[in-house]
Amino acid sequence: MEKITVSAPGKLMLLGEHAVVYDRPCIVTAVGQRMFVTLESLPDPLLELEAADVKVTGYKRSFAELGVGEIPRGAKFVELAVKNFIEKHPLKNGVRITTRSEFSSLFGFGSSSASTVCVIKGLAELTGTKLSNKELFGLAYKTVLDVQGKGSGFDVAAAIYGGTLYFVTGGKVIEPIALDELPLVVGYTGVKADTVTLINAVAEKAARHPELIDGIYTQIGNTVDAAHAALKTKSWPLAGELMNFDQGMLEDLGVSTGKLSAMIHAARDAGAWGAKLSGAGGGDCMIALSSPGTKEAVSEAITKVGGQVIDVATNVEGVRIEP
Ligand code: PMV
């Protein structure tokens, strides 16, 4: 095959952030905004990259140089994904990769992990290499760890499997949750947050209060397990209440902000079953679980306190080859 386009969804964490870095479960849903990656064979062993969304154009590296020296921020995940793939499955030909995102990398929907998954899946298809989802997860998760050092891999799992997943650190458990709807309102704070900075801030707090923070992780894990059961039975008010518990514990970890809290309280006051931050905190997005009857009031309340409501489909299909 000479040319192929692969797409993968972004993600929204529903419950369990931070604790999932430390061997606890989380729940994540794949979102409708997708990353598209086109891969074309080149005669020489070379990576060429066009990723205009992250300001990378005309980028070229020989396969021998992959991962060596300074790599522009926008090229890191793709370059290391190619490196990790060819270390396992050597390639004679080079590859030209073009990425296009349907969502802004600002929202924290996981554009990096989605493009990593697309690149590895695309290279396998392009070269006729059989790759199970488990192997795809392994190579993509390694790439994320190579770039950012930390992370549970929940975003990689969402990009591969899609839907809504019960997930444990490093993919120890990846279990789809059958849902035909997920009534969420998503609000963006307007503030871009850096995941690794927040993970480090929580780790620093854990170093000072090891038992307290470990207890919080365990309680977050228990909350996730209870929410897992509530979602399976569509017990929305209970799931919302559990999201509120989780938010309280994220406040304890110190990752909420005044803006996030304002948006979360506005959503609850407007009738949401529950609301919490989604992702590492420090900015990015909040989510509110809301009945169809309160959705509009919840959206208005979030907007009134300065949030931007984003229209996102949830529970969507995972990585796929585009026609
Ligand atoms: O900032 P996001 O949306 O990538 O979410 C990070 C969630 C953490 O649990 C803090 C990190 C992780 O990899 O699970």
Image (spheres, rainbow, N blue to C red):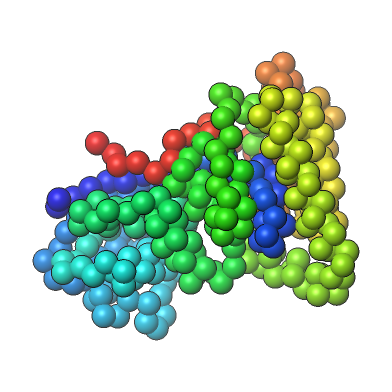
Q: Residue at x 32, y 46 (%)?
A: 6
Give the quarter of the image for residue 84: bottom left
- Horizontal side, residue 34 vs residue 200: left or right: left
Q: Is residue 173 above or below residue 148?
A: above
Whole-percent x, y for residue 313 in the image: 53, 31
- Horizontal side, residue 86 vs residue 154: left or right: left
Farthest residue in the top direction?
293
Whole-percent x, y for residue 56 in the image: 36, 63
Whole-percent x, y for residue 50 in the image: 30, 59
- Whether residue 249 is visible to the viewer of this picture, yes or no, is yes
Q: Residue at x 83, y 57 (%)?
A: 216
Task: Name the residue nearer the viewer: 308 or 100.
Answer: 100
Quadrant of the image containing the C terminus = top left
Whole-percent x, y for residue 167 in the image: 60, 48
- Horizontal side, residue 133 vs residue 44: left or right: right
- Whether residue 101 is visible to the viewer of this picture, yes or no, is no
Q: Is residue 309 above or below residue 198?
A: above
Task: Name the residue nearer the viewer: 35 or 245.
Answer: 245
Give the quarter of the image for residue 136: bottom left
Q: Residue at x 74, y 25 (%)?
A: 235
Task: Name the residue nearer the viewer: 244 or 161.
Answer: 161
